[in-house]
């Protein structure tokens, strides 16, 4: 199979199937109010330059850094795990907060949050609709990474199954970062503040997953022992161990449960933050 055929069969068709499944869930499983919020928010990203700028920045970081600095072509690695996907959670720690910072901060800045929440819809309708709209933007961003998949297939015979799971793992990490940003956006009227704090927290949960950092945190002595519960929590929420397993092509139930639980907890925290703002 040529490079273009491999790109279609192993990347674009699976992406289209995921998009179709998402559309089916939106159409038949979620309430009309969620669809209304989703459409409003998704269009909002493309009514301003923000989505286009972030697409360019993300593709410049991910593809550009991989080709010119991390030797994706010279490494002759068939799965892109160590030359491409290994750095994706770091890029996303910058890009995802920029996507999600407007989820609730913009509503608060414009004074429309109270108006929206007094409409005949439950708060969770707005939370889910806004979150899914931002997630769809990130999904589209990852789909636009297809040039690197085409290039690797053109130059050799890569393991496209592992490459696909690498994108799945990357999307899961992005969903976690987005859920964190949703909470911070609900707590702040300023998009800049929401972005900066979300970026810092995303970096923390990114670094906390590395074995070296984890071992250092858990082996602290002296007065730092009073921080042990917090350090244990940081060690538990690190995304990298779960990302690494999925990126290697190992679709583990434990890893999927971790990402799902992380997102659901943050969405619940978002609802609590919104209730606090309304009180």
Image (cartoon, rainbow, N blue to C red):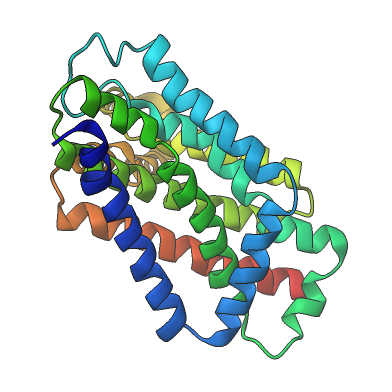
Q: Name the spot of residue 219 as percent of width and height, x first.
A: 29, 26
- Residue 85 in view here: no
- Quadrant where the image shows the C terminus: bottom right
Query: In the displayed structure, would residue 195 be above or below residue 220?
Result: below
Query: In the displayed structure, would residue 106 be above or below residue 25?
Result: above
- Quadrant where the image shows the N terminus: top left
Q: Residue at x 35, y 12 (%)?
A: 70
In this image, 118 relative to 126: left or right?
Answer: right
Residue toward you, 159 or 175: 159
Q: How many marks?
A: 0
Q: Residue at x 28, y 54 (%)?
A: 13
Image quadrant assignment for residue 130: bottom right
Query: In the displayed structure, would residue 244 be above or below residue 106?
Result: above
Q: Name the spot of residue 207 as percent of width and height, x first.
A: 40, 30
Q: Residue at x 74, y 86 (%)?
A: 119
Q: Name the spot of residue 55 as percent of width and height, x first.
A: 57, 38
Residue toward you, 4 or 51: 4
In this image, 174 relative to 250: left or right?
Answer: right
In this image, 159 relative to 122: left or right?
Answer: left
- Residue 20 in view here: yes
Q: Name the spot of residue 48 as percent of width and height, x first.
A: 75, 49
Q: Residue at x 67, y 69 (%)?
A: 40
Image quadrant assignment for residue 147: top left
Image quadrant assignment for residue 16: bottom left
Residue toward you, 59 or 101: 59
Residue toward you, 34 or 48: 48
């Amino acid at each position: 199979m040529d490079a273009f055929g491999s790109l279609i069969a192993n990347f674009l068709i699976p992406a289209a199937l995921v998009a179709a499944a998402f559309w089916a869930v939106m159409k038949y499983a979620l309430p009309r109010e969620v669809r209304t919020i989703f459409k409003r928010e998704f269009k909002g990203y493309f009514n301003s330059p923000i989505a286009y700028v972030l697409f360019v920045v993300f593709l410049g970081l991910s593809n550009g850094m991989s080709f010119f600095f991390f030797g994706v072509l010279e490494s002759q690695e068939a799965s892109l795990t160590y030359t491409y996907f290994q750095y994706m959670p770091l890029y996303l720690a910058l890009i995802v907060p920029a996507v999600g910072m407007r989820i609730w901060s913009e509503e608060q800045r414009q004074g429309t949050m109270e108006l929206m929440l007094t409409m005949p819809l439950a708060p969770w309708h707005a939370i889910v609709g806004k979150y899914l709209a931002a997630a769809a933007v990130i999904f589209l961003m990852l789909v636009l990474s297809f040039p690197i998949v085409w290039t690797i297939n053109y130059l050799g015979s890569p393991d496209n199954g592992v490459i696909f799971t690498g994108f799945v793992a990357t999307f899961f990490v992005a969903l976690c970062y987005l859920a964190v940003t949703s909470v911070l956006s609900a707590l702040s009227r300023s998009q800049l503040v929401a972005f900066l704090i979300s970026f810092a927290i995303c970096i923390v949960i990114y670094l906390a997953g590395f074995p070296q950092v984890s071992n250092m945190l858990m082996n602290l002595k002296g007065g730092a022992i009073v921080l042990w519960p917090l350090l244990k929590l940081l060690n538990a929420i690190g995304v990298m161990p779960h990302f690494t397993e999925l990126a290697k092509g190992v679709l583990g139930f434990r890893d999927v449960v971790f990402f799902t639980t992380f997102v659901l907890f943050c969405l619940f925290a978002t609802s609590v933050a919104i209730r606090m703002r309304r009180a």
